[in-house]
Amino acid sequence: MDDRFAYALALGDDALVLGQRLAEWVSNAPTLEEELALANVALDHVGRARMFYGRAAEIANDGSDEDDLAFGRDCRAFTNLLINELPRGDFAFTMVRQFLVDAFNVPFLASLARSTDPAFAAIGEKAVKESTYHLRRSRDWMLRLGDGTSESHDRAQRAIDDLWGYTRELFEPFAAEVRLASAGVSIDRAAIEPQWRRTVDETFVEATLSTPTESWSMRGGRDGLHTEHLGYMLAEMQFLQRAYPGQQW
Amino acid sequence: MTTEPMPLFEVFIRSKRGLDHRHVGSLHAEDHQQALEYARDAYTRRGEGVSIWVVRSSDIVASQEGDSASFYDPQDDKPYRHATFYKLPDEVKL
């Protein structure tokens, strides 16, 4: 597999899977206003996936398009990070996950905007503005939940404890990414950890939440080894294109 | 689980530099900061604005329908207050 294709695909999968999880809040969110906001963030991620998949399809140059990549691949072919595919859980879980990922995405996309590959750089430049807003929102929710009622605090803390082990994978470069680094195409994701950690620690302190100390961690998404949840999510997301291939409306 | 409704905010958006802020609608939010963010998501998604104001609906003092006789009617029969005797160039007309 071409390294640039694999890189575009992995970043596209990250965005699409998280976008789908966020979109599951539509018609389920606590208030109408929050539902609109969540749907906006979801659409930003889906739009980002489209750009990465479009780039991947361009590199593959085999007649496939972004829809084939989104709806025509099975679980094992998806290479997204595990943290993005976990079920949306309660509102605290969704917002804590979003915060942890946003805090990573802002510095990551800012670096991607300096990629020597102009297509990746353009996506990074567009997406970093979106993620800066996402982080503003999710960080705000950390403070509201953590420093809110005892119920909201407990739910936020539980979500942090459940998610913490999935954050290691954010900083683990995968094979194609490592090979693309010397040409300046890919970003050194391991180098982003100190900045991410600073954002997270500062926010948690302000939100009266604590950073877990356990060291367990989960990985495998980049190799197509997923949690049991991704299959169900894809089954729902891909149903229409699977039942009626090439259907448009 | 909170059952108390969040306060209502009125949203004003300025669509272009040089224009006035216009009332576009209202929304519920916990406080001003959240109201501003929700307003951004609810009302500016298609490039509608360059500036947003939010204000608590309860902070707006409004004239009352019942006062209209004393508030507005007396102005209708004072035509000299209207500058109708000037010719306005087309560019100036609204």
Image (spheres, coloured by chain):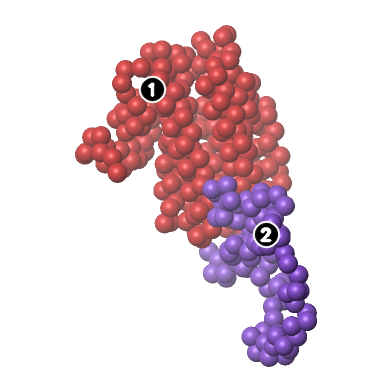
Chain colours: A red, B purple
Whether residue B63 appears in this view of the structure is yes
Q: Chain of mark 1?
A: A
- Which residue is painted at 70% across and 73% down in the image? B60
> Can you name the residue that lies furthest to the left here?
A243
Task: Identify residue type, mark 2.
Answer: Asp
Q: Find residue B90 and name its label.
A: 2
Where is residue A223, by image quadrant?
A: top left
Side of A115 where A90 appears, left or right: left
Q: Chain of mark 2?
A: B
- The quarter of the image holding the N terminus of chain A is top left
* Near-viewer residue (A141 or A134): A134
Mark 1 element type: helix
Where does the image place residue B33, in percent across and percent down from the top left?
Answer: 68, 55
- Local SS, label 2: helix
Observer-nearest of A90 and A161: A90
Q: CA distance from mark 2 to mark 1?
A: 54 Å
Report if the CB atoms under discs 2 and 1 are less than 8 Å apart: no
Kindly indicate whether the residues beneath marks 2 and 1 are on one polypeptide chain. Answer: no
Give x and y (percent) for residue B41: 56, 51
Q: Circle 1 sits on which residue? A: A57
